[in-house]
Image (tube, helix red, strand yellow):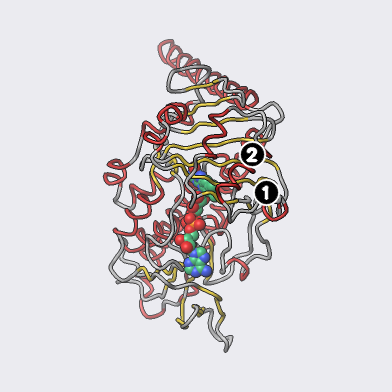
Amino acid sequence: MSSPLKIAIIGAGPAGLALARLLQINNITCTIYDLEADRNARTQGGCLDMHEGAAQQCIRECGLYEQFLAVARTEGEVLKIYEPNGTLIMDEGSDLGERRPDSFKGRPEIDRRQLRSMLIDSLYPGSLQWGHKVVAVKTDPTGRTAKYDLQFQNKLETGFDLVVGADGAWSKVRHLISDVRPQFSGITGVDAKLSNIDTVNPALAKRVGNGMCLTLGCNTTVLSQRNGDGSVKSYGFFRGTEDWHKTCGIDWSNVAEAKKEFVRKYYDGFNDDAKNLMLLADDDDFIPRPMWMLPVGHTWAHRQGLTLIGDAAHLMTPFAGVGVNVAMEDALSLATQIKKWKQNVWDKAGPSATSSLLIEPVRAYEEEMFVRAEAYAKETMMYYDLFFHERGGVAMCEQFAKAKAEEKAKGDVSVEVTELSLNTAVEA
Ligand SMILES: Cc1cc2nc3c(=O)[nH]c(=O)nc-3n(C[C@H](O)[C@H](O)[C@H](O)COP(=O)(O)OP(=O)(O)OC[C@H]3O[C@@H](n4cnc5c(N)ncnc54)[C@H](O)[C@@H]3O)c2cc1C
């Protein structure tokens, strides 16, 4: 029996799309609404590393793993760290310095656009409604049901049993279940894309390499990532104020001058390569980007018919590179709960079934997610401090070495335990 419940997913980002796919392949109908006009309406930003066991498991369950492997870039898994003067202190491509701990392995990169397209193409035709900006989620005006209406810019859709806010940082669903708003993270700067880097500046392309390239100064960084389309996305970030981009005196409408002024003011002491990653950026892709976050450990009391997944639930800064992974794990967790509920409760309940039966599976997802998201948010805060450290990249390399030593110690203990149990088995 297919579920007659009316489910809306707000937002066609990785979280919302993955949830829609997982529900649909389990014969649970849903509609996904996004404010954008179509999939190409906005450039989708840089690439994302998809972790084994979190995002990759979600992709497997979506039945899209082969397609993912066809576009995923394992060669993008390498990291380089430079000091501002141009000294390379770590390079996983050439084994200079310590490599990151093994827990960083199995994280191929995928361009955001490719991930999104793969998921969009997997949905039932007509189930993704573009050009639908939710302006308000309304409760039943009669107060007699726990159903919700969606107010779009120019129409109203009524009678939803479950509304899932997958609409990112500035969710229009969140305020119905939580008073908490995103807060400024203390980090600000610019987002810059340099297209066709192999042609524009082959030496700079070589400097970045195939993966992520960090230039870490005292509280100031240039974080660059090679994308599958031949571009490099760089973020020039530092510790600043929420309104820095408005008060810094840089005229962002004059991009050529803004690039020079930004680099002159904030990257004094950085070598030309680090500066060129921003100075040579495309003129239509050099934008200020203050970073926002929800508090670590954000939770709410369950409210029937509403929930949040992805950034809407636990917006984090990108410094541990986990946001999309947590988001896709949310989609998998919620879909699994709803699927189990459909099989074990709804399909057996027959005519006596009511949407209040959905409370338990959604609550179970939330309780699992709160714990998982908090752990990722704490990890993110640890890397936040390492990206913006008084001792620059040295502090990050020390952390990797410490984590590697811990990993090795754990490995040694498990080897000893295995040997011990083998010996015991022999003696016995
Ligand atoms: C600079 C930067 C770099 C990052 N790098 C990484 C990384 O390397 N690895 C990683 O794991 N994560 C990274 N992240 C985090 C990652 O991008 C997010 O965690 C991820 O995109 C969250 O997915 P989502 O689906 O929850 O939200 P989003 O991707 O934000 O999608 C939300 C969707 O909702 C739609 N929407 C919004 N409002 C409405 C509305 N009112 N009505 C209808 N639709 C609406 C939007 O159009 C959008 O399609 C980075 C983030 C930033 C800012």
Residue 185 is marked as 1
The residue labelled by disc 2 is 384
- Label 2 CA crowd tier, 10 Å (few <14, some 14–19, many 20+): some
User: What element does badge 2 sit on?
Assistant: helix
The quadrant of the rendering that contains the N terminus is: bottom left
Q: Residue at x 38, y 69 (%)?
A: 30
Foreground residue among 270 and 112: 270
Up the image or down, 149 lies above or below 93; here it is below
Up the image or down, 16 lies above or below 289; here it is below
Find out whether the residues at labels 2 and 1 contact each other: C-beta distance under 8 Å.
Answer: yes
The quadrant of the rendering that contains the C terminus is: top left
Q: Residue at x 55, y 71 (%)?
A: 304
Provide residue 106's location: percent of width, then percent of height.
40, 33
- Label 2 amino acid? Tyr
Provide residue 223's location: percent of width, then percent of height.
55, 37
Quarter assignment of residue 380: top right
User: What element does badge 1 sit on?
Assistant: loop
Up the image or down, 243 lies above or below 423; here it is below
